[in-house]
Amino acid sequence: MSFGEKTVLGKDELFRILKSISEGCEIIGPVMEDGKPYFRPVEGVEDVAWDFDTTVNGIKEFFFPRRSVLYEQTNDGIRPFDPETDKKRIVLFSRPCDARALTITDRLFMGENQDRVYGALRANTVVVGLSCEKAGPHCFCLSVGGSPFGTEGMDVSITAVGDDEYVLDMVTDRGKAFFGNRGRKADSKRLQEFETLKKRAEESVERTMRIPKDLPSAFESDYWKEVSAACLKCGVCTYLCPTCHCFDIVDEGFYRVRCWDTCSFDTFSRMASGEDPRKDKYMRYRQRVYHKFSYYKENFGVYGCVGCGRCTKHCPVKTDIVEIVSSVDEKGMP
Amino acid sequence: MKDSLVPDPARIEDIRNETPDVVTLRLVFEDRGKMETFSFRAGQFVELSVPKAGESTFCIASAPSDRGYIECSVKKVGRVTEAVHMLEPGGIVGIRGPYGNFFPIEAMKGGNVLFIGGGIGLVPLRSLIREVLSARSDFKRLSVVYGARSERDLVYKDELDEWRTRGDMEVVLALDPGGEMEDWKGEVGYVPSVLEKRTIETKDCTAVTCGPPVMIKRVLGVLDGMGFCSSQVYTTLEMKMKCGIGKCGRCNIGPLYVCKDGPVFTYERIKEFTEEIF
C-alpha cells in the first residue's frame, strides 16, 4: 500500500482501532451537552459523537488555551510553567474547517519567536478529522479556501461513505505512524462514491462570501459605522472563531497569565495615557474584518477565516460577516 | 526551549527623578552573561514588568554605546508605571527584548540630523542622540528642537544643558504657552510652531521626531511644508502592546505591526495610515 492511498474499513473496526490507538492518550472529541455539540476532553472513544452539526466551540482552545500560566514570579526568580504536554493527545473528528484553522494559526504561532505553549500542544497532539457530509446553514468554507472534505491540518482524515463504512486518508507521516496500515485498499467503486459524496457535500454549502479585491479602499467609508451599529461588543464572534488569536498578558498575583482577548473590547488598544487609535466601536469591528480579510492575507498569505460561520450563528444581534464583507464593493466604497 | 514571553530579571542600579512624574531607571541584568550579550540599536524597546502589576512597553533610553547597563524612562500614567515609581534602587524588574526595528543611523552618517521631540517623546531620541554623539565626527550639523508643557516637564535637564553648551550642536527648547516662568530664556510655543519658524536646510538632512500623537502629526505636516522628502523623515510610534513579538494582535496600523515592523517608520511608509494613527 503506497503512502496517501485511501483505505476502507467498517465502523466497528474503525471504532476498535481508534480505541486501541488512543490508549494512554488524552482524548478530545465532540460530545452533546444540553442538546448542542461541543469539543471537550472525553474519557473514551465511546463517548464521542459520530454525527454532529457544527460544534459551538472549535478545537482552538486545546492548542491556544483560554488561559495559560506562563510563569511564577518568586523571590528566587522566575519559574516558567511547562504546558501540560507530557501526555500524548488525540483530537477525534475535527471538522475540516477547524483543522484547517490550525494551519492558519500555525503561521503566526509557529513562525519566528515560536509560542512555547502552542508549539508544545501542537507537537503532542494527533488530529483525526471527519469530513462533513453536508454543510450547515451558516457554512461558507468554499469561499475562503476550505472544503467540507478538506484535509489541511489533519493527520488522518476519515469520511463516512455509507453502509457504515469509512474511507481513511493518511494525511501526514505522523498520522500514518499513529494509525499504521489499516483497512483494505479502496477500490474504484468506493473511490468513485467518495468523489460523488465530496461533490454533494460541496454543493450543500449554500453561503458564499465575496471578498472584495480592494478592501483597503473602503477603510474610510461610513459603511463600517452602519454595519457595526448593533454590535454589543460582547466578543463572542472572536472567542468562537477558530482563527482569532489575540491575547492579553496579565498578572494574577505572582502568576503571569496569558489569556484570550478580543478586539471588540474598548480596552483592547487603549493606552494608559488614554490615547486609543481604535476608540470607536466601528473602528474595532473594522479592525476585525480587516485583520481577517486584508492584513492576515498580506502578512501570512491566507485569510484569517475558515468559513465555519460560528460568528454569525452565535452573534446575539445577528451581525453577519458574510453579508457585510460581500457587500463592501456595492455599499462600502466611499 | 526558551519562552519568548518569559523575562530576565534585572536589578535597578539607580533611579533619577526627571520630572514630577518621570523617573529614569538604570538597569543591570542579574545574569552577568545576559548583560554582556544584550545588544540593541537606538530606537528599540523592551517589555518591562513588575510582579503583581504587569508588563508594559518602554523604549530604551540609553545608547548602545553605553555599555554595562540599560536605561528606561517611565512616566507615571497607569498601573504598571505606578508600580515602577514605587520601586527603589536594588529592586528587581523583568525585562524582555530588545524588540522592534531601529533608527538607520548608518544612513544618517555624513549628513545633518534634526531631532524634534515633545515631552516624554524625547526618550527614544535620547538613545539616538547619545549614539550619534558617541561618533560625532561622522555627522555634520545636529539640531534638537524639544518642547514640554512647562520647565519642570523637560526630561534629561542636565543632559540638555550639556548638549546646549558643548558647542557642536544646536538645542532649541520650547515650553507650551502659559507653561513658562518669567525667567524662561527659551522659546514659548508648541513644538510644531517653533519648528516652523526656523530655517532648516533640508538637503542631506534626516529629521527624526517623537512625541504625543497630535504633535507628531503636526510636525510631519510642518516638515512636509519645509520640503523634506517623506523618506527623509522618521518617527517612532507608540501603540498598546502585550507580547512585543507580533502575536497578540493589537498594535497594528493597517497591516504593519508597530512591535515588529516598527516602532520606527519613515513618514513615507505610514503616510497612507495617518488617519488611522493620529
Image (spheres, coloured by chain):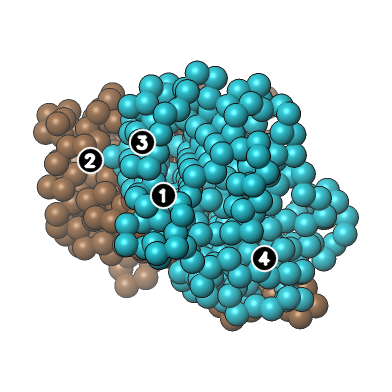
| Mark 2 closeness class: few <14, some 14–19, many ≥20 residues within 10 Å | many
Chain that bears disc 1: B
Chain that bears disc 2: A
- Image coordinates of residue A106 in percent, x first then y, are 56, 42
Name the quarter where the C terminus of chain A is drawn: top left
Name which of mark 3 and mark 1 comes first in the sequence.
1
Q: How far, Cα to Cα, is label 2 from label 4?
A: 50 Å
Tell me the residue that label 1 is attached to.
B187
Labels 3, 4: one chain? yes
Q: Residue furthest front?
A: B183
Tell me the residue that label 3 is attached to.
B197
Q: Of tags 2 and 4, which is closer to the observer? A: 4
Decide if residue B196 is in sight here.
yes
Q: How far, Cα to Cα, is label 1 from label 2?
A: 56 Å
Labels 2, 4: one chain? no
- Image coordinates of residue A184 in percent, x first then y, are 61, 34
For the colour cyan, the matching chain is B
Check residue B25 in the rendering and tell me which mark sits there, or answer none. 4
Residue at left offset 72%, top offset 63%: B26
Q: What amino acid type is highlighted by mark number 3?
A: Lys
Q: Residue furthest right?
A: B33
Tell me the residue that label 2 is attached to.
A322
Residue at left offset 88%, top offset 55%: B33
